[in-house]
Image (cartoon, rainbow, N blue to C red):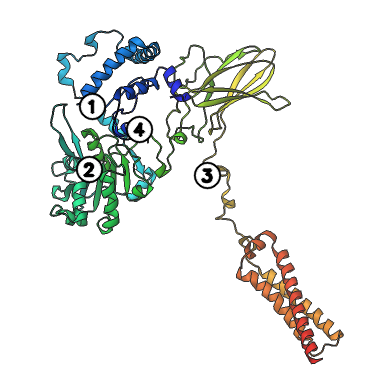
Amino acid sequence: MGLEEFSTWQKNGGIIVSDDLGSAAVRKFFDPMNTSFDARQVIKSALLAGNDLLYTGNILATGDPDTYTTIVRTHAFFVQKYTEDSAFQQRVDEAVLRVLTLKYELYPSFIISNTVTPSAELDNVGTSEGKVFEIARQSITLVSPNLSDMDSVLPEPPQSSERIVFISDMITQQQCSICLDQSISLAENLKDAVEKFYGPGAGEQVESYKLTAYSFEELQKLLNNDNPPEFMKSDLQAANWLVISFTDFKKSSIASTIFQRFFSEQPDLSRNKKIIGFAFNAPYYLDATDISKFTAYYAVYSKIPVYVDVAARILFQEIVPSGILPVSLTSIGYDLITATSPDPDQIIPLMVEKPGEEIGSTETPSSSTEAPLTYKVGDNIPLRTGVIIDHNGNPVPDGTVVRFLIDTKSASGSIEQIETQTINGIARTSYRIQNIGVFNLRVTADPAQISQILNLEITDAGGQITSFEPTLAPTGMATPTATIDALETPENQKLTNHEQGMLSAGDWLLSTIFIFSIASILYWWGWQKQKYSWNPRIPVASILGGYVVYFYFVIGLPGAADGIKNDGSGLILIWVVLGSLVGGGIGYLWYTLERSKKV
């Protein structure tokens, strides 16, 4: 809780909610031997650590018969502690004040009628399904593959001739605290949603008898050969689509275990099928290997009926998922910090903030016909950016560092820098004009480095600000395509042999001249030395050596093409001459060895 981010959040009016204090992980941490779990101390520690709201869950202290008893005893302990310990009292007051401050923003007066739904409006309770549907539509996220690849990965939704098998874990829920547990199958719910929207009563895009649903427990029976449902294996074999849904995919869960076994023990049942995954809870339990088994993998986040309906529509490509992952997902290389950092492929708007503009406004001021303001030495220029967007196209988080850079065109080349932070995606500052001269003002927010530029030339009479926008080069382009002449493109240029790493006819002619010239010289030299019997062999060896080097370049052995591209004919002739001389030297060495044998 000592992190700067937490303290800043609380200073700005935010509250911190604890994790489930009754979870098995917390219990194991405080009581590894499971012999004495003191719930009162656990809850007190969570409060003193900085949490404002304490989520106790189903916390149960050792020796208590139920959770209710534990909570009542903890309340009594807190009351006693509050009256006896001033430090504890202060911490409770701080937390309560933060909570009540937020409640006061919702309900400015403490009147019970403000919080209780009037009896006349009870009929409207639960009728805002349209809003929930829109929330679900905007939140569901395509995790893998990228949206741009979906047209090639899944060019069309399930067809009427195709069979779909739904598999999911079972969920146990209670309608109320005293109600009996009910087992719910997400697979059945998703199958029913598909049948409702696309079955015989809604366009007949699918046939009801071609839709089947099973649980992971039933799939486990199939893998164990332990009396599985009668037609389960044949349904899996005949299926064109497998839709696998889960709420709990921790490594110890039955869904995770059976999922791994299914693909490793029965690969023939998943071969040549479109496999769709829906995570109706947290999406980060699957690793890269698990995700690779899916044709498409979606994060749904909730298992309530509206989200199930939206998942069915996404399966049939009626809705394009537009949600963004709210957490980092290392299995697909998605890092939340990087994703919410400023997008480098943007031009950050920079402008002078006009008097009267609201500090909290996030709208870029529209152009007006007002006369431009004149600034003199000593004046303060109020500056602001437009909305800076992140890699997902959303405003960057509050607190993103932004730097205003003022180039005073001084002889030293120094640039003044003002560092500030964003609020609602916008950064603000002011700059005091200190002297006469020319100023350029721009802004950066790493890794975004390009912004509009404000130019100000101050004279004794003052000066006015002009603005211009630099050109943002397209990603992956070295130069703008508009400046490229069609005649100069690689497709239309006629490359020479040397530019392609190949020899030309001129290379062959020059090499032959050099080779036979050297051979003639060696023949003449041998004749002068009266080496009559070996004289022809020395120039022949020289010719062979020269052509061996020449054909090294012809064949394109390692280094040949690069050498031709870089140095052309000069390099070829140098190596041909060296080859001819080496060949002649080998011929002369041969002659010397034979002569020594005769002696």
Residue kind at label 3, given as amino acid type: Gly
Q: Residues within 10 Å of mark 1 (few under 14, many from 20)?
A: few
Mark 1–mark 4 Cα distance, whole angstroms, equals 18 Å
Earlier along the polypeptide chain: callout 3 or callout 4? 4
Q: Which mark is residue 149?
A: none
Provide the residue designation for mark 4: 29
The residue under the point 48% across, 28% down is 388
Earlier along the polypeptide chain: callout 2 or callout 3? 2
Mark 3–mark 1 Cα distance, whole angstroms, equals 66 Å
Residue kind at label 4, given as amino acid type: Phe
Q: Helix, strand, or loop for circle 3?
A: loop
Residue 162 seen in the current view: yes
Q: Are marks 2 and 3 in contact (CB under 8 Å)?
A: no
Which-is-in-front pick, marks 1 and 4? 1
In the image, 14 versus 541, the foreground residue is 14
The residue under the point 61% across, 71% down is 555
The N terminus lies in which quarter of the figure?
A: top left
Earlier along the polypeptide chain: callout 3 or callout 1? 1
Provide the residue designation for mark 2: 169
Residue kind at label 1, given as amino acid type: Gly
Residue kind at label 2, given as amino acid type: Asp
Q: Residues within 10 Å of mark 3 (few under 14, many from 20)?
A: few
Q: Helix, strand, or loop for circle 2?
A: loop
Provide the residue designation for mark 1: 63
Which-is-in-front pick, marks 4 and 2? 4
Q: Helix, strand, or loop for circle 1?
A: loop
Provide the residue designation for mark 3: 476
Position of residue 97 relative to residue 384, above or below, is above
Position of residue 190 relative to residue 104, above or below, is below
Residue 64, quarter of picture: top left
